[in-house]
Image (cartoon, grey):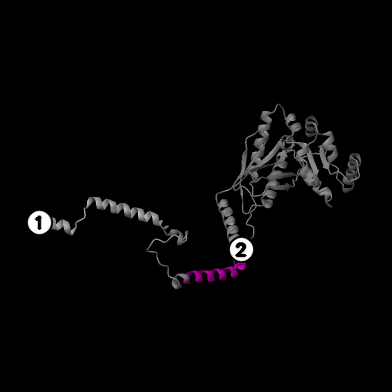
Amino acid sequence: MESTREDVVLDRSQVKTAVLALIAHLKSTSSSKKVIMNDGQPISLLITLWKIPKKEQTIRIRLPNGLRTESAEVCLFTKDEAQMTSEQTEKFYRKLLAERGVKNVTEVIPFKTLKTEYKPFEAKRRLLGNFDLFLSDARIRRRLPGQIGKHFYEQKKAPLSVDLLSKHLAKDMELLIQGTTLTVSNKGCCCMARVAHSGMTADEIVENVLAAVSTISTKLEMKGTNIKIIHLKTQKSAALPIYSSDLSHIILVEESREKARLLKKVRKTENDNMEAPEDGIKRKGQDSEEEEIPQLVPIETPTKRPKRMDLPKKGLKKAPKPAAVKGLTKTMKDKKLSKKTPKVTARGLTSKARSK
């Protein structure tokens, strides 16, 4: 599917008024102008999205005016080389950086040294305060969170990964040191990137803001114009809006998502149709057989209660009574009848007739 992404165009005059307002706010809250210039308080972009992205994304941004001077302290964490001590590994990577033309790295710390010398909590806090930026070899990036602790991430100084085996190492290092990064999280709709500091002039800050927004809008993986609002702020100031999209952009986002869903459904149905022709034939045959069975063999409802077939028929017959018992019962009955009904004879009848 083709992308419907559109570049976000900022109004330069509106951005400049917001920058001047931030500089005036910093001057009013500070004791003097020199304090502001020495502090170099960061100025950041706060970007709000219409939809929360499904995947996390890190965007590297090249700025026309670098955020750090040549005196900035940069620390690099490297991998431990095989059959080398920590000192030999440090010398090896310092030589590699010098050959590639990288001059801004002030300290090289192998991973073994990080585990042993910077294991205590106080040592980690001291390391965090001594450097402005931390870089890490891409081969040990996943092993660093358990060694440096959560304070690096809380103070937004998490090490940025760099490929030390790259042929364009000098350009990559310059992009990380003088540029900035934006981490688009999949847990919320807001993200922030540092684009300038209070030691710059107003025009330099405006140029960095315009370049950063242009890069973010082109590299953002979300389809359509997903950027809702862009604010400019310092650490303790209010957020000043410099861009606000209308509701038509959310319609574009919904349309692009609906097209993606329809494409998924079409592909799924095509795959199902390619895999299930034989199954469909079998199912049709089974259905026809099941329909013909009631016509050939009609089902009759039973009228009588079905007999139990558990016991055999022989077991249901009554046992015959003994013969002695039968004779006893007959004699007893005859005696009773003889007592109640006297016998009538011919002699008795003739005697009764003479007496009369």
Q: Say above or below: 223 vs 34.
A: below
Towards the viewer: 58 or 282:
282
Towards the viewer: 310 or 94:
310
Q: How would you rate the neighbour count of disc 2 (Cα within 10 Å): few for under 14, some for 14-19, many for 20 or more?
A: few
What mark, if any, has residue 81 been given in the picture? Answer: none
Horizontal and vertical percent for residue 356? 8, 54
Q: Which residue is mark 1?
A: 354
Horizontal and vertical percent for residue 274? 62, 68
- Label 2 secondary element: helix
The Cα–Cα distance between marks 2 and 1, rounded to whole angstroms, is 130 Å
Please state which amino acid type lies under the numbered disc 2: Arg
Q: Quadrant of the N terminus?
A: bottom right
Horizontal and vertical percent for residue 66? 77, 42
Which stretch is magenta? 269-292
95 horizontally vs 32: left or right: right
Res. 347 in view: yes
Q: How would you rate the neighbour count of disc 1 (Cα within 10 Å): few for under 14, some for 14-19, many for 20 or more?
A: few
- Label 1 secondary element: helix
What mark, if any, has residue 267 been given in the picture? Answer: 2
Horizontal and vertical percent for residue 184? 67, 46
